[in-house]
Image: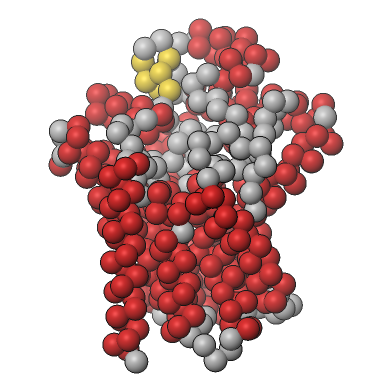
Amino acid sequence: MKNILKFKLSIILIFALALRIISIYFYRDIEVANEWGIILENLETYGILSVHTVQGEPVPNIFMPPLYPLFLYVIKIFFNNTDTFLWSIQYIQLIFAIITIYIANKILLEFFSENISAIGTLIFAIFPLNVYAVSQISSITIQIFLLNFFLFSYLKLFKKLEIENIFIFSISSGLLMLLRGEFFIFVLLSMIYLYLKQKNLSKILIISLITLIIVSPYLYRNYNIFGVITITKSGGYNLLKGNHPKTKPEGTPMFLSVEKVVPEVKKDLEELNAKGPNDNFDLEQDKILLDQAIKFIKENPARYVNLYFKKILSFMFIDLNANYANYYSPLHLIPKLLLGITTVIGIILTLKFKVNMMNYIIMYYFANIGLFSIFFILPRYSLSLLMIQVILSLVIIKKIKPNL
């Protein structure tokens, strides 16, 4: 039986590898664009993590999390040639993606039989957006990689608080926080839920300590420069991008041109820039954007409550008013819609009022949707819940075919 399982998994991994190589060949990014490119250039030129420049001088970054640009910077050290550098990013991400599929299979085997797990692993491996993601210079591939380690180690901890899984969970938690600053919310929720199951405060504190050790150098850096203990400070930008009179569920592109999209903040931003370079530029700019976002919401709360629920629906199912290229391609739309529907059915079939792992999965799913819908929903965000959705969807197969 083990040989059959290994054979099935090998076929899936080989097929997944082939699809991703094709994706890279046809759809690969040919530059490090937008904020990643800016931070990388400033790291190379000035040796500073910076995404904003004031009067020609880069100012310290607290706007973007540090892990992905540092990942790019390390690769650039070894592969300085531009073309080699770009290919290297995508093929390293390809390796991460294949390992992620392998871990996905391990996660599914914690819930389902070998046959159902093989079906779920195949769905995860060939989901079109997941195949496409590896060709893009984006943090999402590494995020999914770390998320699967996070989830797998959490599954193990939920059964028994072994030291090996404590380390894996803590390290993946810390790295995810350095990749996505808001992830500390999900780490906190996960540890509270774990305590409800295990009632072992000392080991929960060990997890907290190891996680804190992982993120502490960057927390110290931000406290030393900005006087605040945080990984990122971009709530104002994100809230305004997803909540102003012209926005849609996906938000409105504002990077480096906020004053053009939102003329109400133009004067304040001009005054901020007129002060010249200062370490608190990112903090002060985000405060300006936060104040304006709150002002918009207060002026028409009903509109933004309605928009919030539109974002939820676009996250769970599809966005009916998207502007992203190829969003409405059947290759993207049909799998996303089917997975969204089967996820909801799986939740209905699964939900029970007790502390168990499936309820954690459901809580994690709705916590993500609830949080990100406050801001805006990009197509790639659904990949952060792909493993969760596959688990919940497979519940249907298990109910229909319990002996499969």
Using the image, determine if residue 254 lies above or below residue 71: above
Residue situated furthest front in the rendering: 330
The answer to which image quadrant residue 146 occupies is bottom left
Using the image, determine if residue 75 lies above or below residue 238: below
* Residue 387: percent from left, percent from top: 50, 64
Q: Is residue 209 visible?
A: no
Q: Quadrant of the N terminus?
A: bottom left
Using the image, determine if residue 299 lies above or below residue 309: above
Residue for point 41% across, 29% down: 34
Determine whether, in the image, residue 193 is placed left or right of residue 58. right
Residue for point 57% across, 43% down: 328
* Residue 354: percent from left, percent from top: 70, 79
Foreground of the two, 25 or 376: 25
Using the image, determine if residue 137 lies above or below residue 338: above
Residue for point 75% across, 46% down: 309
* Residue 180: percent from left, percent from top: 48, 47
The answer to which image quadrant residue 305 occupies is top right
